[in-house]
Structure formats: C-alpha cells, structure tokens
Image (spheres, grey):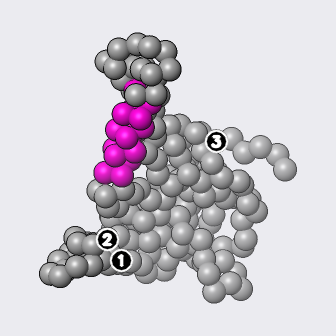
Amino acid sequence: MADQPKTAGSTNYYDGVLSRPFLAEQYYRGFIAAVVTTIIFSFLFANLFDISLLVAGLIAGTFSFPILVGIITQHQRFELTREQYQSSLWVLGLRFGEWQPLPPIDFIRIRHWQQRYELPLTDGSAPALDLTAIEDKWQVLLHATDSPVGLVAAYVSQVKARHIATEIASLLHVEIHD
C-alpha cells in the first residue's frame, strides 16, 4: 500500500486525540509510582555504591522523572487515512498501535456519552463513604457498513465533536447524522 502524506491540515489524513485520562486518581497513581521508585532506588544506590542518600536520590530521580512525565502525558490517539486507521497509545511522543484496514464507512454519528465512576473512600469498613464521578463527553462514531459496532474517533466536548466529525466527513466523503 502506498504511503499517504501525513501532514497537519491535510485533506487525506486525520490525527487527533481519542481520549485522555479522566480521573485525577490516575495521575495520583503515577506520582506515587515515581516517588516510591525514587525512594527505593535511592536506598539501593546509596547502599550499593556507598554514596550519600542525597546523591543517590538525585540519581534515582533522573530515572523516575521520565516515568512520571510519561504517565501524566499519555493519552489515546486516533489516526485515519482514506484506506486505514490506527488507534494508539501515545506516551512521550511514542505511538504504540498498529494500522488496520479501514472498513467501508456509511456515515458519521455524534452522540452523547456519559459514564459514572464509583469512588469508594474507605476499605469497606463502616461507615462507607462513596463519591460518584461523572465523565460527560460526546463521541464521534464512524459507522461501518454491515457492522453493529463502529469506530470511535473521539471522546470530546460537543463543539469539538462537531469540528472533528466535519473534518473526518470531508476526508471520507460521508455524511454526518446526529
């Protein structure tokens, strides 16, 4: 298959953010992982190389910082040409995912999507305090011919969903159904 020109604003290529982590808890876990890694490796380096704990902490921190940045900056991307698509994980500028052949697309649909997340604040002992977080987005769906399942191109705000749907409809020469 011939390579498609892949440039921003091109009429034969779409590249956009599919979704980003929603809950701050996901970033919190990344921060904890980086701090714990720094502490463990600081003690390990200090003992193995007989150096001060401060120097060992600085050395270990240089390894933990990219982990933290990677977790904070990661998101899912959706790329599309007229013949193929890719849903990938983006971390520190690296994309992890494979190109797939694009099935025939009949139309594009924009629909409201809401997901509730239960956030327990205790370990199950009484009294149990629960909070509910609500992710409220709009999906841009590519309806594949003869398939009950389409391709999700984005989870974004309503205004962005309309813009993305218009851009992809122009690329694929299909209509938008609301």
Q: Which of label 1 and label 3 is nearer to you?
A: 1
Q: Nearer the viewer, residue 112 or 33?
A: 33
Q: Which residues are magenta?
A: 27-42
Amino acid residing under circle 2? Glu
Amino acid residing under circle 1? Gln
Residue at image point 46% right, 28% down: 44
Residue at image point 42% right, 20% down: 46
Residue contact at pointers 1 and 2, CB within 8 angstroms: yes
Q: Say the numbered circle drawn on residue 135.
A: 2
Tell me if 78 is positioned left or right of 53 in this view. right
Q: Say the numbered circle drawn on residue 6.
A: 3
* Residue 145 image position (x, y, % from top left): 69, 81
- Cα distance, mark 1 to mark 2? 5 Å
- Give the class, few, some or many, for how many residues have Cα within 10 Å of label 3's Cα (few <14, many ≥20): some
Compared to 149, does 70 lie above or below?
above
SS state under label 2: strand
Q: Which of label 3 and label 2 is nearer to you?
A: 2
Q: Earlier in the sequence, mark 3 or mark 2?
A: 3
Q: Which residue is mark 1?
A: 115
Amino acid residing under circle 3? Lys
- Look at the image and tell me whether residue 164 can be seen: no
Asked if residue 177 lies in the magenta stretch, the reply is: no
Q: Earlier in the sequence, mark 1 or mark 2?
A: 1
* Residue 116 image position (x, y, % from top left): 32, 78
- Give the class, few, some or many, for how many residues have Cα within 10 Å of label 2's Cα (few <14, many ≥20): few
Compared to 151, does 30 lie above or below?
above
